Amino acid sequence: MQSTLEKYNKLIVAILVIVASVIGVGYWFAEEKSEPTYKSKIDKLMFDKDNKAPKFILTLPDKMTPEKTKIDAFVDDVRKTQIKKKIEENPDFSLEDLLASVPNIFNLPAQSPTQQLKYISLDESLYETNEKGQILPKIAADDRKPWSEYGNSVDTQPNFKKVAIVIAGMGFNQFSVNKVAESFASEVSVSFTPYTPKPEDAILAAREKGHETYVDLLLSSRDFAIEDSGPLSITSDLTKDDAVERFHQIIGKKAPIGGVIIKDGLVNPENSYIIKELLTDAKQRGLLVVDASNEKIIDELQIEGLARRKADIVISKDLLKQDIEELLQEAENIAFNKGQVLIVAEPKPVAILALYNWVKTFSPQISYEEAKKVEISKPFALVPLSNLVVE
């Protein structure tokens, strides 16, 4: 009897264990099913199943990857309006006419180089190889510096104003590099993105046509939720050593570069010492620095002996044709007032074509005595970037 009772108790216990297990599993699945599906790590970070006060408050756009920015939408609307207006003005407006109105740099004619550089490839006295195998620019033992040695000085008539143009952000498309190099006068300088697939080939192709060559220094994107400046940008969360290492990755090329073009982006006031460290490194390596950003912090960083220049006009990727034309008019005014002007432009077809056509309007250089006999409407002379930089 006792044995039967023990068996009965064990059976009851087993049943209770099974029921408890089923209830536990069911509750676990219910919890899992009720938990929301997270679209991002940020969503998961903000979810708090214990209903506690959040540790972080984040303000983000409604969409992390919007289909179009407001600027893109505006540009599209303008273009549609322009096309509609052309069709209304000319009922015979054809597809060929439409294609002809689209900016296209591939139709630009090639020209022979207007100057030759002293060095097409690296001069062994102007670089060093560090312990990581990186080839880095350096000042030669006789105090010659890459920014001046890899550049070229051109003569201009005293009554002509100097105009330096840098087309920055080049390198993603080698065909575009070749086209710009062969179509523009050699006095136009080019700067390459740090993400150029084959930087040495691109740099040498430009230098063979007489163009001074530089590299872009990218800062943190102003709109990080839409545009990422990439793994080679100088972000505000880097340590000083990491920033210098990244800087060396940017300037470490097996082809001549004269310096860096600082593109627009964010600089954290608390971390501005990092940018100062990079500018100091550039000075010690004999490189020039062009500030094409909108950051006043960079202007305030004083580095004695650094070859540097602030861009007077920056033609960004989001500008329309009429905006670019207004900027070029402003560039003319600056040149008349200061005797020189520096323009840094993104390699967008609309900008490249506008610059190409603008340069064609420059008056031919003539002497001061000859200028007394004729009217000169645009006394502008193209010069390489290095001609506008002083230490």
Image: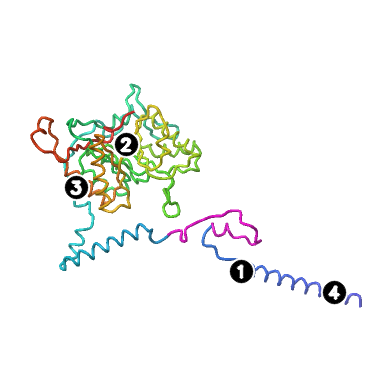
Q: Residues within 10 Å of mark 4 (few under 14, many from 20)?
A: few
Give above or below for 29 relative to 340: below
Q: Residue at x 91, y 78 (%)?
A: 1
The residue beneath circle 2 is 255
Residue type pointed to by label 3 = Asn
**What element does badge 1 sit on?**
helix
Which circle, 1 or 3, is nearer the viewer? 3
Q: Earlier in the sequence, mark 2 or mark 3?
A: 2
Q: Earlier in the sequence, mark 1 or mark 4?
A: 4
Q: Nearer the viewer, residue 105 or 302?
A: 302
Where does the image place residue 242, in percent across and percent down from the top left?
48, 38
The residue beneath circle 1 is 34
Q: Earlier in the sequence, mark 1 or mark 3?
A: 1
Where does the image place residue 60, in percent across and percent down from the top left?
49, 57
| Most common secondary structure along the magenta stretch | loop
Where does the image place residue 123, in percent across and percent down from the top left?
30, 29
Based on the displayed image, in which of its 4 quarters is residue 258 positioned? top left
**Residue 232 seen in the figure:** no
* Magenta-span inclusion, residue 212: no
The residue beneath circle 4 is 9
Which circle, 1 or 2, is nearer the viewer? 1
Task: Point out the image quarter for the C terminus.
Answer: top left
Give the residue furthest to the left. 373
The residue beneath circle 3 is 357
